Amino acid sequence: MELGFIITIFLIGFIGSFISGMVGIGGSIIKYPMLLYIPPLLGFAAFSAHEVSGISAIQVFFATIGGIYAYRKGGYLNKQLILFMGVAVLIGSFIGGYGSTLLSENLINVVYAVLATIATVMMFMPKKNVEDLPLDEVTFNKVIAAGSAFVVGIASGIVGAAGAFILMPIMLVVLRIPTKMAIASSLAITFISSIGSTAGKIITDQIVWEPAVIMIIASLIAAPLGANVGKNMKTKSLQLILALLILASTVKIWLDIVG
């Protein structure tokens, strides 16, 4: 591999994983188009969509591990929230992936786009202040948490995309989880949901291992750095960055449908 190619892939992985660690979403919305378009723009061989999907899946797996490690202290990881939403999204994504053959591709995309639009609206809604609540006193409705994660998991499994950017506004607006706890817990939930997709990509040989290893190394460095920056940022700033990323995701999904 050329040195320029190695540096390019490393920087793509670093930027995506840094943002992933900072705001608690998988980061694919950034890494996917960068992997698809930047290498050929710089004169390197282009990856296919399947190869990009495979590299991105295994990179998200390691980026979330790095983010979780950085948040392991301080009480930010809500184990009950992770258990209820993580298990529900995993079951939902399995059902969605299995049942996706029964639906038309256009209907699948519209379902996901509607969920993403709802998530965008929720991010810009006024939020009741729960940021000052002691982390060990945070409570949530377990039925709503599991039910919403299950629905998002089904939609994500059908489309084959991560649903973390939809789960985040549910945690913030509906379940009223403090922002930094939601970010940390979202990383753990995304890790759980990425286990199946990563295993599937490895089993079906969809991963190009040399660039994937470079991305993994970048992830393990950048995700903890991003998480540490996120821990020290103002809550309003984190919410704004997250809202803009979710808006960008939603616009892209609708453009894909219309296009």
Image (cartoon, rainbow, N blue to C red):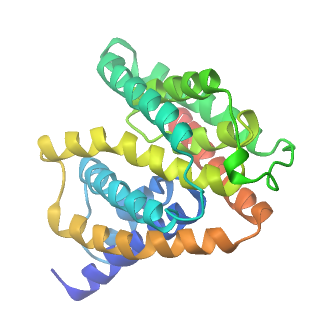
Occupied quadrant, residue 241? bottom right
**Coordinates of residue 102 in the picture (x, y in percent):** 34, 12
Identify the residue at image location x=36%, y=59%.
36
Asked whether the viewer can see residue 70, the reply is yes
**Coordinates of residue 114 in the picture (x, y in percent):** 62, 28
194 horizontally vs 51: left or right = right
Residue 188, compared with residue 80, is above or below; it is below
Residue 103, compared with residue 128, is above or below; it is above
Q: Nearer the viewer, residue 200 or 193?
A: 193
Q: Nearer the viewer, residue 14 or 172?
A: 172
Image quarter where the N terminus lies is bottom left
**Coordinates of residue 240 in the picture (x, y in percent):** 75, 59
177 horizontally vs 211: left or right = right
Identify the residue at image location x=48%, y=57%.
27
**Coordinates of residue 142 in the picture (x, y in percent):** 61, 26
248 horizontally vs 32: left or right = right
Q: Nearer the viewer, residue 2 or 82?
A: 82
Identify the residue at image location x=26%, y=79%.
5
